[in-house]
Image (cartoon, rainbow, N blue to C red):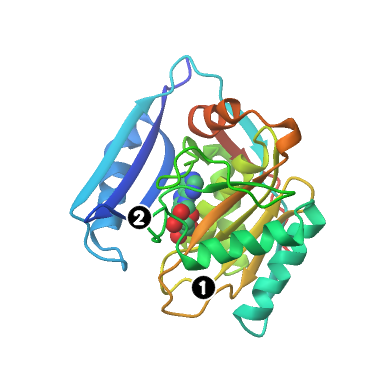
Amino acid sequence: MTDTLYSIRMRASLGGRHIAGAERIVSRNETELVTGELVARAMTHERGTPDSVAVTVDSLAGKDISRVSALPVRMYETAGYIVGRAHAVRELARAGVTDAAARAALGMITGGASATGVNMRGAMVIDAETGKRLEPDKEAGVRARSVDYDPGFVPELKQALVRHRLDGTHFREALALATKVAHAPGIVAELCISDDPSYVTGYAASPANGYARITPLKETGDPMGGRAFFVDAARFDMDAFIDYMRETPVLVTGPLDIR
Ligand code: AMP
């Protein structure tokens, strides 16, 4: 019998503002270790010491687990964040996002995308044609959860990340998330800029072109960041999209193609 898996979610906030979050899928005997690691990460976060940390552990027994290959990764280093953002807009255009929609998303992410002008804890959902925001809750956005790497793939993943000097948690977690997002019904592309002031790398990802890791997408010390999920409004069902993002467990496997 295979071991039951558990989805672990962490969300940390300070004065109601999002500080940090993380999603994992682990076996029963890893739950204590991983919840401890995630609480420690939240309590030492560079965005501040949270006054509230929520950790949820949910059994995935009886759920169908989807296994998908990691998006192929291409790495781009640009002369500065303005060039980096222009490159992100081009990557999004190649995937089918209009210039207007890409620029609207960038403006909202860098200006504070929540209804109160701060970072959101989830992502905006944006019409890839018009740039219109579609998510029902503009404060929280839509959070993807229940995603991690297949344990059988982790040794190969670790080796590849060390070889490419990508062995921090940011890239590792972002690639898993972007891979899940790229399989969502109606998705066209995704744009991410971290909200950690010291982490200036971001990405544009799509099912068509994979994961473009772009450095930098912001200035060091800038606390603004966020995510945009661009969708094809003509073949889009918000309930099915949110249900997939929240409820479908996804384990990311190889092969890993990083260049
Ligand atoms: P991070 O890459 O963790 O620095 O997150 C950057 C931004 O992406 C956050 O400010 C959130 O708005 C958004 N975000 C983080 N995690 C998720 C997630 N699991 N699903 C959707 N959006 C997320």
**Which numbered marker is on residue 20?**
2
**Residue 12 in picture, x, y percent from top left:** 29, 51
| Cβ of mark 2 under 8 A from ligand 1 | yes
Which residue is rendered at x = 28% and y = 55% of the image? 42
Q: Which residue is mark 1?
A: 200
Q: Residues within 10 Å of mark 1 (few under 14, many from 20)?
A: many
Labelled pair 2, 1 in contact (Cβ < 8 Å): no
Q: Quadrant of the C terminus?
A: bottom right
Residue 44 in picture, x, y percent from top left: 25, 63
Q: Quadrant of residue 32?
A: top left
Q: Nearer the viewer, residue 50 or 168?
A: 50
In the image, taking residue 182 as reference, residue 96 lies left or right, namely right
Q: What is the secondary structure assignment of the residue under circle 2?
A: strand
Q: Nearer the viewer, residue 174 or 254?
A: 174
Secondary element type, mark 1: loop
> Quick one: which residue is furthest to the bottom in this view?
79
Horizontal side of 135 relative to 206 (left or right) equals: left
Amino acid type, mark 1 = Val
Residue 169 shows up from this direction: no
Give me the residue at 38% from left, 61% from top.
Answer: 118
Q: With respect to residue 216, does 48 lie above or below? A: above
Q: Is residue 134 left or right of residue 71?
A: left
Instruction: Name which residue type carries label 2.
Output: Ala
Query: What x and y, as percent, mark residue 80?
Result: 62, 83
Q: Give x and y (percent) for residue 129.
A: 75, 49
